Image (tube, rainbow, N blue to C red):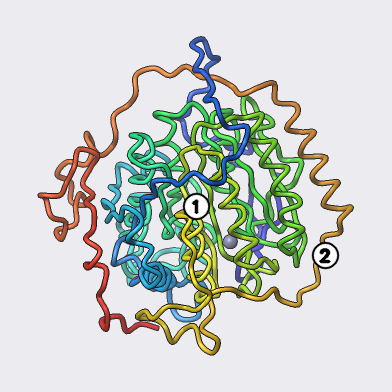
Amino acid sequence: MKKRRTTYFGERSTTWMAKDGNVPCSPSSVPHDPPHVRVPTTPGHKSQDMSSKKRVSYFYHGDVGHYYYGPGHPMKPHRLKLTHHLVLGYGLYRKMEVYRPHIATTQELQKFHSQEYVNFLSRVNPDMGRTLSSSVHSKFNVGEYTDCPIFDGMMEFCKIYTGCSIDGAQKLNHKITDVAVNWSGGLHHAKKGEASGFCYINDIVLAILELLKYHPRVLYIDIDIHHGDGVEEAFYCTDRVMTVSFHRYGDFFPGTGNIKDVGAKNGKYYSVNVPLEEGIDDASYERVFRPVMAKVMEVYQPSAVVLQCGADSLSGDRLGCFNLTLRGHAKCVEMMKGYNVPLLILGGGGYAIRNVARCWAFETSVLLEEEVSDEIPRNDYYDYYAPDYKLHLPPGTTENQNSTEGLEAIKVQILQQLSQIPGAPSVQMQEVPPDWATNERGGGEDEEDPDVRSSNRNRFGGERREHEAEFYDGGKDQDR
Ligand SMILES: [Zn+2]
């Protein structure tokens, strides 16, 4: 069953279904067994409490912004440095715990990805990439004819952003924090055995697998303009993870995310797709997001929530065509924070890099309930925000092609699908598997960053709290 799919750079035809023609249900580690031990549902999800301050942990590695996909490529890890320095400029780091992550190991990556694919990514480099046969490029969907180039340090980059997401999940599992933030994560298109849409390793799936060790039900929400296909595919057949994606649907990458795709087998009705048209504005987005998420929280009662905050749904994105302002985008963050459920906040797409930084710095302030000025504070990248040096964006002039009636019909259909769910499913939770940190991160070549001070290591695995001053590497950042 072939489905036409576009890449960011053009069109290619590929299968959405697994290569054997079956509906893919990737992680073998998600149990589907019928429950016989009831795990009580966590009370207090049904209503929101907008005012309670949360303990927020922030994960950042100083190297993550140094990687480069190549000339003209829209994905620019440099945006992560801009974001981080805006967070610093607003003084937000003083209000949260700041951590440098561990570097994820190849063993950790194989909790979701195939060994063959991880081995390939570990070995390949740009020089080798030029000599590989087209069948290898096509098998793993990497190389110059795809939107996933082989660039210097590609695997290190993946291991850094994935380490941040896994560490965030572990902090939530151990109740050390209420909210964990990793703006370098959220690479939602990567598949078990192939790269897709600028994403090589799916840190989201790996973080959710970590959360599932402690949480009976994990909710994944995706507000990137593109369908969260890699995460949906991974958990398509289980009720232990509900995925909800709001995205542009039509002639648009990756081509999946039809409203009728609701999950399969035990996961039927646990995948939710909200297809939207170009030009959606703050009011229209909220009109769908709020009632759908309220119903999801009511029927599913997740014990942890992962929110992918792709910023390519903002007005003026280089690849996106929505018309959200920072305030409209951040309302989703604010709403989900109000449910008082452990929350993992991730980045994602976003190709107008100044606006990505504005968005994620503002959302950090929303999570912290700290007011920030519309005047961009002095920081290492202050000049990027010329000519107005303002935080907030005005809405663009793109026509909103989402009619009120059309959005109402989508909302009604999704609420109807959600009403098929009999109640929050419980699962058999047996022995809690150990953190990968404690039993699998020993002595390997990827195991640790030589810069990490061993004296600050803790039992949850190799990360340390970063001293705030260490984030200021002012003047050294040259790459624009
Ligand atoms: Zn995207």
In the displayed structure, 122 sits above or below 41; it is below
Viewport quadrant of the C terminus: bottom left
Q: Which of 388 and 418 is in front in this view?
A: 388
Write down the residue under mark 1: 190
Residue 36 disc label: none
Q: In this view, does 277 lie to the left or right of 167?
A: right
The vertical placement of 340 against 348, above or below, is above
Residue drawn at (44%, 31%) of the image: 212
Query: Residue 355, percent across and down?
Result: 54, 73
Characterize the local packing of mark 1: few (<14), some (14-19) or many (20 or more) Cα atoms within 10 angstroms.
Answer: many
Q: Nearer the viewer, mark 1 or mark 2?
A: 2
Q: Which numbered disc, 1 or 2, marks the residue that appears first in the sequence?
A: 1
- Residue 479 in the image, given as x and y percentages of width and height: 35, 82
Judge by depth and name the residue closer to the eye, 16 or 446.
446
Label of residue 401 in the image = 2
Can residue 245 be seen at all in this image of the molecule?
A: yes
* Amino acid found under the numbered disc labelled 1: Ala
Q: Is residue 317 left or right of residue 183?
A: right
Q: Where is residue 223 in the image (x, y as percent from the top left)?
A: 61, 54
Residue drawn at x 55%, y 59% is: 310
Seen at 29% across and 34% down, the residue is 435
| Secondary structure at numbered mark 2 | loop
Q: What crowding class fits label 2: few (fewer than 14 Cα within 10 Å), some (14-19), or many (20 or more)? A: some
Percent coordinates x, y for residue 8 in the rendering: 61, 67
Q: Specify the quarter for ligand 1.
A: bottom right
Picture residue at 75% right of the left edge, 44% below the top? 259
Looking at the picture, tell me which residue is in the foreground, 427 or 201: 427
Q: On the picture, is 339 further left or further right than 156? A: right
Label 2 is placed on what type of residue? Answer: Gln
